[in-house]
Protein backbone atom coordinates (compact mmCIF):
# COMPACT_ATOMS: atom_id res chain seq x y z
CA UNK A 1 0.00 0.00 0.00
CA UNK A 2 1.46 3.38 -0.98
CA UNK A 3 2.18 5.75 1.87
CA UNK A 4 0.58 9.17 1.59
CA UNK A 5 3.88 10.74 2.61
CA UNK A 6 5.22 9.87 -0.84
CA UNK A 7 4.65 12.74 -3.33
CA UNK A 8 3.98 10.17 -6.06
CA UNK A 9 1.04 8.98 -3.98
CA UNK A 10 -0.38 12.48 -3.32
CA UNK A 11 0.09 14.30 -6.65
CA UNK A 12 -2.15 11.94 -8.64
CA UNK A 13 -4.98 12.56 -6.18
CA UNK A 14 -4.51 16.34 -6.42
CA UNK A 15 -4.21 16.34 -10.22
CA UNK A 16 -7.11 13.92 -10.71
CA UNK A 17 -9.28 16.08 -8.45
CA UNK A 18 -8.54 19.17 -10.55
CA UNK A 19 -8.93 17.15 -13.74
CA UNK A 20 -12.35 15.98 -12.62
CA UNK A 21 -13.55 19.53 -12.08
CA UNK A 22 -12.73 20.28 -15.72
CA UNK A 23 -14.19 16.95 -16.87
CA UNK A 24 -17.44 17.51 -15.02
CA UNK A 25 -17.87 21.00 -16.50
CA UNK A 26 -17.01 19.67 -19.97
CA UNK A 27 -19.52 16.82 -19.77
CA UNK A 28 -22.34 18.39 -17.77
CA UNK A 29 -21.81 22.16 -17.52
CA UNK A 30 -23.71 22.80 -20.75
CA UNK A 31 -26.88 21.37 -19.19
CA UNK A 32 -27.37 24.73 -17.50
CA UNK A 33 -27.45 26.32 -20.98
CA UNK A 34 -29.85 24.04 -22.83
CA UNK A 35 -30.93 26.91 -25.07
CA UNK A 36 -27.46 27.03 -26.65
CA UNK A 37 -26.76 25.30 -29.93
CA UNK A 38 -25.47 21.76 -29.50
CA UNK A 39 -22.52 22.49 -31.79
CA UNK A 40 -21.44 25.35 -29.52
CA UNK A 41 -21.78 23.10 -26.47
CA UNK A 42 -19.59 20.48 -28.16
CA UNK A 43 -16.87 22.99 -29.06
CA UNK A 44 -16.82 24.55 -25.60
CA UNK A 45 -16.78 21.10 -23.99
CA UNK A 46 -13.81 20.04 -26.15
CA UNK A 47 -11.96 23.17 -25.10
CA UNK A 48 -12.59 22.47 -21.44
CA UNK A 49 -11.70 18.78 -21.86
CA UNK A 50 -8.25 19.76 -23.17
CA UNK A 51 -7.35 21.04 -19.71
CA UNK A 52 -8.77 17.90 -18.13
CA UNK A 53 -6.40 15.79 -20.21
CA UNK A 54 -3.47 18.08 -19.39
CA UNK A 55 -4.01 17.14 -15.73
CA UNK A 56 -5.20 13.53 -16.02
CA UNK A 57 -2.35 12.23 -18.16
CA UNK A 58 0.44 13.44 -15.84
CA UNK A 59 -1.60 12.29 -12.83
CA UNK A 60 -1.66 8.77 -14.18
CA UNK A 61 1.99 8.82 -15.24
CA UNK A 62 3.09 9.97 -11.78
CA UNK A 63 0.63 7.69 -10.02
CA UNK A 64 1.84 4.62 -11.91
CA UNK A 65 4.98 4.81 -9.79
CA UNK A 66 3.02 3.73 -6.71
CA UNK A 67 -0.47 2.64 -7.82
CA UNK A 68 -1.67 -0.09 -10.18
CA UNK A 69 -3.81 0.92 -13.15
CA UNK A 70 -6.88 -0.49 -11.38
CA UNK A 71 -6.11 1.59 -8.30
CA UNK A 72 -5.64 4.75 -10.38
CA UNK A 73 -8.96 4.15 -12.13
CA UNK A 74 -10.65 3.55 -8.79
CA UNK A 75 -9.21 6.77 -7.35
CA UNK A 76 -10.46 8.63 -10.42
CA UNK A 77 -13.97 7.16 -10.11
CA UNK A 78 -14.30 8.01 -6.41
CA UNK A 79 -13.09 11.55 -7.08
CA UNK A 80 -15.56 11.80 -9.96
CA UNK A 81 -18.44 10.91 -7.64
CA UNK A 82 -17.37 13.47 -5.07
CA UNK A 83 -16.85 16.24 -7.63
CA UNK A 84 -20.06 15.40 -9.47
CA UNK A 85 -22.08 15.41 -6.24
CA UNK A 86 -20.95 18.94 -5.44
CA UNK A 87 -21.38 20.05 -9.05
CA UNK A 88 -24.88 18.62 -9.22
CA UNK A 89 -25.97 20.44 -6.08
CA UNK A 90 -24.19 23.78 -6.57
CA UNK A 91 -24.10 24.23 -10.37
CA UNK A 92 -27.14 22.32 -11.62
CA UNK A 93 -29.20 22.97 -8.44
CA UNK A 94 -30.26 19.31 -8.29
CA UNK A 95 -30.82 17.47 -5.02
CA UNK A 96 -29.01 14.35 -3.97
CA UNK A 97 -31.27 11.67 -2.53
CA UNK A 98 -30.75 8.83 -0.10
CA UNK A 99 -30.75 6.57 -3.15
CA UNK A 100 -27.79 8.47 -4.56
CA UNK A 101 -26.00 8.22 -1.22
CA UNK A 102 -26.63 4.48 -0.99
CA UNK A 103 -25.43 3.92 -4.55
CA UNK A 104 -22.30 5.99 -3.96
CA UNK A 105 -21.67 4.07 -0.72
CA UNK A 106 -21.79 0.78 -2.60
CA UNK A 107 -19.33 2.15 -5.15
CA UNK A 108 -17.07 3.27 -2.28
CA UNK A 109 -17.27 -0.24 -0.82
CA UNK A 110 -16.21 -1.64 -4.18
CA UNK A 111 -13.35 0.86 -4.30
CA UNK A 112 -12.19 -0.26 -0.87
CA UNK A 113 -11.93 -3.82 -2.19
CA UNK A 114 -9.55 -2.67 -4.94
CA UNK A 115 -7.12 -1.35 -2.30
CA UNK A 116 -7.22 -4.43 -0.08
CA UNK A 117 -3.77 -5.92 0.22
Image: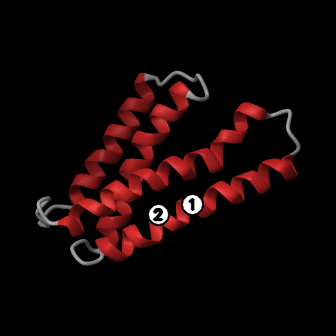
Indicate whether 98 appears above or below 42. Answer: above
Mark 1 highlights which residue? Answer: 51
Mark 1 burial class by Cα count in 10 Å: few <14, some 14-19, many 20+: some
100 or 8, nearer to the observer: 8
Please tell me which residue is depicted at 65% across the width and 40% down the height of the picture: 29
Indicate whether 90 appears above or below 68. Answer: above
Q: Is residue 113 left or right of residue 94?
A: left
112 or 20, nearer to the observer: 20
Looking at the rendered structure, the secondary structure element under dot 1 is helix
Point out residue 63 in the picture as x, y percentages from the top left corner: 30, 71
111 or 3, nearer to the observer: 3
Please tell me which residue is depicted at 38% across the width and 30% down the height of the picture: 101
80 or 20, nearer to the observer: 20
Image quadrant containing the C terminus: bottom left
Looking at the rendered structure, the secondary structure element under dot 2 is helix
Point out residue 1 in the picture as x, y percentages from the top left corner: 12, 66
Tell me the number on the disc at residue 55: 2
Q: Is residue 38 left or right of residue 98?
A: right
Point out residue 62 in the picture as x, y percentages from the top left corner: 31, 74
Please tell me which residue is depicted at 80% across the width and 34% down the height of the picture: 34
Please tell me which residue is depicted at 88% across the width and 43% down the height of the picture: 37
Quadrant location of residue 77?
A: bottom left
How far apart in space, not on screen, are marks 1 and 2 (Cα)? 6 Å
State if disc 2 and disc 1 touch (CB < 8 Å).
yes
Point out residue 56 in the picture as x, y percentages from the top left corner: 46, 65
Amino acid sequence: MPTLLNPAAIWPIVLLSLSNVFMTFAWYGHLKFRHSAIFAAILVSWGIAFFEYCLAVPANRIGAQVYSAAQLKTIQEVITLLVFSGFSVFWLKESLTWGHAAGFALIALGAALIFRA
